[in-house]
Image (tube, rainbow, N blue to C red):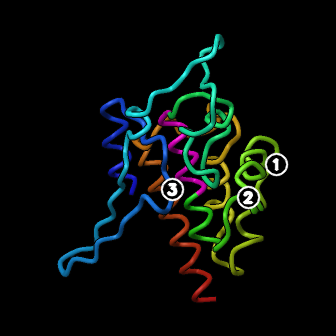
């Protein structure tokens, strides 16, 4: 998934609407492939701008389950917003629950703005998420864009966290 996202970011394009529904897993006999679809679709929508340079309406912000706080405030999609969305997806895949439980899209948007997520290790089955992986996931969903990796080309940090997470899972399985 990160390879496709990084390819967009290397070309100066933000996905802008990353969500589980836009991730397709191909199970070809030779190799499994993860495809990210609908990339850059936010560039195709007309956006009305206010005097402050922000969008005047919420429609283009993407999924309420994965939108970064700055998108909810009206900023256009960015690589750091994509990193936040990736973190939201990773949180949900590993814990089985969305980053924020909400009854409505507006409630979800507000939660992204003002609530802190539950620690992934407290939501996931016991032992699935160790301290390093938890810190990493929480860095991806930092409320402040400057607290996140700048884009998906920061794969080395992401791969390092993945390797630590795999070691933690293996240790848990042995113990």
Distance CA(mark 3)–CA(mark 1):
20 Å
Question: Percent from the top left, x then y, of residue 49?
Answer: 57, 18
Magenta range = 78-88
Query: Magenta stretch: dominant SS?
Result: helix
Residue 101, magenta (yes or no): no
Badge 2: few (under 14), some or many (20 or more) residues near its Cα, within 10 Å?
many
Find residue 100 and name its label: 2
| Sequence-first disc among 3 and 1 | 3
Q: Is residue 114 left or right of residue 62?
A: right
Residue occupying image coordinates x 57% and y 39%: 59
Q: Does 86 appear in magenta?
A: yes
The answer to the question of whether label 1 and label 2 lie on touching residues, with beta carbons closer than 8 A, is: yes
The quarter of the image holding the C terminus is bottom right
Judging by the rendered image, the residue that carries numbered circle 1 is 115
Q: Which residue is mark 3?
A: 19
Residue positioned most to the left:
30
Percent x, y of residue 31: 23, 74
C-alpha gap between disc 1 and disc 2: 8 Å
| Front residue of this view, candidates 108 and 97 | 108
Going by the picture, which residue comes out furthest to the bottom? 174
* Residue beneath the point at 43% across and 33% down: 45
Q: Which mark is first along the chain, 2 or 1?
A: 2
Q: Disc 3 vs disc 1: which is toward the camera?
A: 3
**Marked residue nearer the N-terminal end (3 or 2):** 3
Q: Secondary structure at mark 2?
A: loop
Tag 1 secondary structure: loop
């Amino acid at each position: 998934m990160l390879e496709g996202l990084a390819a967009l970011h290397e070309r100066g394009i933000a996905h802008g609407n990353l969500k589980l529904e836009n991730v397709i897993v191909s199970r070809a006999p030779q190799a499994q492939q993860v495809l990210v679809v609908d990339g850059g679709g936010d560039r195709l929508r007309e956006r009305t701008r206010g005097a402050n340079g922000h969008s005047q309406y919420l429609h283009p912000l993407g999924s309420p389950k994965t939108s970064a706080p700055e998108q909810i405030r009206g900023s256009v999609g960015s690589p750091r917003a994509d990193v936040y969305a990736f973190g939201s997806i990773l949180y949900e895949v590993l814990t089985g629950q969305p980053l924020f439980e909400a009854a409505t899209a507006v409630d979800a948007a507000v939660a992204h703005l003002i609530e802190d997520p539950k620690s992934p290790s407290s939501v996931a089955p016991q032992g699935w998420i160790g301290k390093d992986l938890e810190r990493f996931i929480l860095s991806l969903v930092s409320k402040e864009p400057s607290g996140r990796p700048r884009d998906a080309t920061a794969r080395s940090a992401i791969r390092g966290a993945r390797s630590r997470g795999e070691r933690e899972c293996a240790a848990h399985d042995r113990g």
